[in-house]
Amino acid sequence: MLSRAQDIESGAPARSFADLLDLPAVDELLSRRGLRTPFLRIAKEGVVVDPKRFTGSGGAGAEIADQVSSEAVLRLFADGSTVVLQGLHRLWPPLIEFADQLAADLGHPTQVNAYITPPSSRGFSPHYDVHDVFVLQVAGEKHWRIYSPVLADPLRTQPWTDRAAEVAAAAEQEPVIDTVLRPGDVLYLPRGFLHSATALGEISAHLTVGIHPVTRWAAAESALDLVRTLAADDPAMRGSLPLGLDLSDPGAVRDEVTAVLEGLRSWLGRLDPADVADRLRASAWAQVRPAPVAPLAQSAAAAALTTGTVLRLRERLRCALRNAPDGGVRLLGGRRTHTFPEAARPALEALLAAGELKVGDLPGLDDGERLTLARRLVTEGIGTVPDAGGAADGRA
């Protein structure tokens, strides 16, 4: 569960993940980036600080009331509070790139938070997460205690606060891991494992890379969502219960409930597993962010397309082609679905297979159709023109 990051060739300890985040970067985020809640949380000994204690107006021309006050953060941090930067996979360029690529490699949505703790302090009491976590120690040292789960593989609807007494009791037992993380160390925490950490003699900073697993329960939810949609078209399922029915009497509603359950079983039996899988795919893809695009540069590039322009599939955009019910072809791209005429199928298949083609090399179309298709792919955020700049370079 614990491993020291090493250079693969030399075997020597690697850098301390400072290329992803370091303490000066934390100061920049807290003081110069106009952070707002909920991108910042502050806690001390398991108690979360009221955001009103560290936020306020941004001043003239920025009267948003919940901007982070750097001097308030300074006071709280000096008093022993832990600073938590949340959603850094949407804020900090190196972590945008890192998290997006990791999600593409793993096939599961990811998130990144940072925890910065003053010397000899603890921000949170023992708890568990409902997603898997990789802890990357960035600066300083932190003493970690890991305990066995009170609930194996908890779902997102089963937070530790629902089992606070069990968690507290389990944290009184012997830890399964009792160790100190130093810069360059990595700790893997499967969801459900209890943990707490205390900074040692200097400021400690670590990243938590959360992996949100696509679970069998998520597949069950997709099936139930599909049944809910289909069963709504069933007149028998939409029928009203008898007037005067006493809902407090289980015996009185038994027949009605039995009929409903039989109807649901019937609808579940009619489901095509491929339809359930596609709904599960759509749910998972909606949580994964492809590489950002530069709206102004790409808009200008789309207007200036020629047959010699290189068209590149947007990096880390998950794509698949399906037949459209009314003819044509559907392109499933991330959280969106796009419908194209059947004539565009060979060109789309070629682009998805190659990843990059000149517009003039898109097969099955004449030059005018190629330009029309390419222009739409760029303006819809499916393709990019790499020479336009900022297409997929990880910049926010």
Image (cartoon, grey):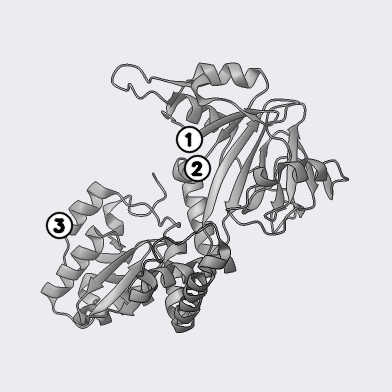
> Residue sitting at 35 percent across and 17 percent down?
59
Q: Name the side, left or right, on which 371 lies relative to 282.
A: left
Q: Pointer 2 and pointer 1: residues touching (CB < 8 Å)? A: yes
Q: Nearer the viewer, residue 208 or 56?
A: 56
Residue lying at the far front of the rendered structure: 244
Instruction: Return the residue nearer the eye: 318 or 14.
Output: 318
Gap in angstroms between the C-alphas marked 2 and 3: 34 Å
- Amino acid found under the numbered disc labelled 3: Ala
| Horizontal side of residue 280 vs 8, given as left or right | left
Amino acid carrying mark 1 in the image: Pro
> How packed is label 2: few (under 14 Cα within 10 Å), some, or many (20 or more)?
some
Q: Is residue 231 visible?
A: yes
The quarter holding residue 358 reads bottom left
Residue at (26%, 80%) from the top-left corner? 325
Does 272 appear above or below 31? below
> Looking at this view, is 176 or 253 the one in front?
253
Mark 3: few/some/many CA within 10 Å (<14, 14-19, 20+): few
Q: Which mark is residue 87?
A: 2
First reached walking from the N terminus: tag 2 or tag 1: 1
Q: Quadrant of the C terminus?
A: top left
Question: Number of numbered discs present?
Answer: 3
Of the two numbered discs 2 and 1 in the rendering, the one whose residue sits closer to the viewer: 1
Residue under label 1, please give it. 38
What is the quadrant of the N terminus in the image? Answer: bottom right
State which tag comes first along the sequence, 1 or 3: 1
Q: Position of residue 262 (x, y in %)?
A: 50, 78
Which residue lies at the image location 47% right of the left edge and 24% below the top edge? 31
Where residue 303 is drawn, which disc sits there? 3
**Local secondary structure at mark 2:** loop
- Describe the element under mark 3 as helix, strand or loop: helix
Within-10-Å neighbours for mark 1: few <14, some 14–19, many 20+: few
